[in-house]
Image (tube, rainbow, N blue to C red):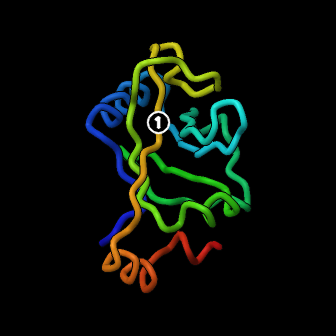
Amino acid sequence: MTERISATPDALALIAMLDNRFGPLLFHQSGGCCDGSSPMCYPACDFRVGGQDVQLGDIGGVPFYMSKSQFEHWQHTHLIIDVVEGRGSGFSLEAPEGVRFLTRSRVFSEEERVELEHNDPAKECV
């Protein structure tokens, strides 16, 4: 089945370390001005998912959300969460580690697009 989100091995290792340190986590793709559109990682109990948020899937067992309005712009792409050196200016849990999560993307193939048209829980929320 075509998935909307995945993570690199480096990102999965960082997610596992953060999960071990902080407990259950969640991601929300920010749409802020300072960090651009960055994947932000929070303790699950510290972030309130709203009615206008769409869950794209899970990475490393952690749910990944973005706003419905932002999903409208990203719906044609597969998001790949990676980690790079450098600090973002947000409140994401990885910031003190000297790294930051980064979203990479690729456009879905025609075959993937057709599959998502017929079987995509995220689209049902929009």
Res 114 → quadrant:
bottom left
Instruction: Looking at the picture, tell me which residue is in the foreground, 101 or 47.
Output: 101
User: In terms of image quadrants, where is residue 16?
Assistant: top left
Q: Position of residue 18 (x, y in %)?
A: 43, 26
The amino acid on which the numbered mark 1 sits, given as a three-letter code, is Leu
The image shows residue 61, relative to residue 99, as above or below, that is: below
**How far across and down, in percent of the image, does residue 47 sit?**
67, 39
Q: Residue at x 42, y 52 (%)?
A: 105
Residue at x 41% of width, y 59% of height: 78
Q: Residue at x 66, y 34 (%)?
A: 46
Number of callouts in the render?
1
Which residue reaches farthest bottom?
118
Quarter of the figure with the N terminus: bottom left
User: Relative to 15, is 70 above or below?
Assistant: below
Q: Kindly identify which residue carries mark 1.
A: 102
**SS of the residue at dot 1?**
strand
Residue 68 in picture, x, y percent from top left: 67, 63
For residue 51, side relative to residue 95 (left or right): right
113 sits to left or right of 65: left
- Check the picture and name the quadrant holding the C terminus: bottom right
Q: Residue at x 61, y 62 (%)?
A: 73
User: 10 Å neighbourhood of mark 1: few (<14), some, or many (≥20)?
Assistant: many
Where residue 19 sits, quadrant-wise, is: top left
53 left or right of 15? right
In the image, is 108 to the left or to the right of 72?
left
